Image (tube, rainbow, N blue to C red):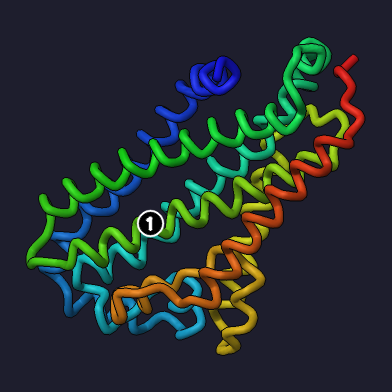
């Protein structure tokens, strides 16, 4: 419990910054929506001039772009990109920081098992992501109600925002297991940005094609927001695959960390 509370305290500042950044980004996009609705015909004409592959890569659906949920679907990919960076950075850093900050020896001589260390840090990371999502969702809902020009489904809005948490879970788990393969990880951000942007670019390329099987390659494409809007449900195969990725990566992290030689940075 002490380790869990210590991690939460150390992550407090970065969590507040990330949460405020996501809220500010959503508020900025929502502020454009009333003007978009006013000039809906011109906006649709403008987007219609974009090549279809480009519209697919950007998540633009001309059929519902002027509805609040349709507009949110277009801009939500940027929100998930920011959330994925937060989660990946958290996953890579939370265990590896013991070597970077030269506290590994001090921690491991304590009467606590390695699985208990992983559990405490994992629970702290999950708490941080859950808090980020709860605050972000509440703020996004308030702003959406302020700028709406017609009623929208609060259930679908909740489902769309929940995908942010699901994607963050996948990148958190990937960050955990990736950090296990470095004995002395001195820089976290390059790895986090490289992995996240790599998957994001792959997802954008995949979106230009018509092969649904390719979507399994990038976590960013596991949740089709247009599908969620039209069906008020998730696509089960991708949901199951995401769960398998999270469970497998976390389980592997426990196994590897229990057997890993951990050295303090000299």
Q: Position of residue 248 (x, y in %)?
A: 70, 57
Q: Position of residue 27 (x, y in %)?
A: 26, 46
Asked where in the image residue 210 lies, by quadrant, the reply is bottom right
In the foreground, 78 or 103: 103
Q: Is residue 242 shown above or below 209?
A: above
Q: Position of residue 34 (x, y in %)?
A: 13, 60
53 with respect to 38 (left or right): right
Identified at 56% across, 70% down, the residue is: 240
Identified at 20% across, 50% down, the residue is: 141
Q: Position of residue 25 (x, y in %)?
A: 35, 45
8 with respect to 122 (left or right): left
> Hey, which residue is sitting farthest bottom in the picture?
210
Please state, as top left, top right, bottom left or bottom right, where the N terminus lies in the image: top right
Identified at 29% across, 47% down, the residue is: 137
Q: Secondary structure at mark 1?
A: helix
Residue on which disc 1 sits? 162
Please state, as top left, top right, bottom left or bottom right, where the C terminus lies in the image: top right
Identified at 63% across, 63% down, the residue is: 244
Q: Is residue 16 shown above or below 172?
A: above
């Amino acid at each position: 419990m002490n380790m869990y509370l210590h991690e939460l305290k150390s992550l407090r500042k970065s969590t507040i910054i990330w949460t405020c950044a996501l809220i500010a980004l959503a508020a900025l996009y929502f502020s454009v929506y009333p003007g978009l609705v006013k000039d809906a015909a011109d906006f649709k004409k403008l987007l219609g001039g974009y090549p279809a592959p480009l519209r697919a890569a950007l998540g633009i659906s001309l059929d519902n772009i002027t509805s609040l949920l349709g507009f949110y679907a277009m801009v939500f990919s940027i929100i998930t990109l920011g959330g994925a960076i937060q989660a990946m950075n958290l996953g890579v850093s939370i265990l590896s920081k013991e070597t970077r900050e030269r506290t590994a020896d001090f921690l491991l001589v304590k009467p606590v098992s390695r699985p208990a260390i992983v559990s405490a840090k994992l629970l702290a990371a999950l708490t941080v992501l859950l808090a980020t999502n709860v605050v972000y969702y509440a703020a996004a809902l308030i702003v959406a109600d302020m700028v709406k020009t017609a009623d929208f489904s609060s259930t679908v809005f909740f489902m769309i925002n929940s995908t942010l948490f699901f994607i963050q879970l996948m990148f958190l788990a990937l960050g955990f297991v990736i950090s296990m393969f470095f004995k002395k990880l001195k820089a976290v951000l390059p790895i986090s940005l490289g992995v996240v942007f790599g998957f994001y670019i792959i997802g954008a390329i995949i979106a230009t094609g018509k092969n649904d099987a390719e979507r399994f390659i990038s976590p960013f494409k596991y949740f089709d927001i247009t599908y969620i809007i039209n069906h008020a449900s998730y696509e089960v195969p991708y949901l199951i695959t995401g769960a398998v990725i999270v469970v497998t990566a976390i389980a592997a992290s426990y196994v590897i960390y229990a057997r890993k030689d951990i050295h303090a940075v000299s």
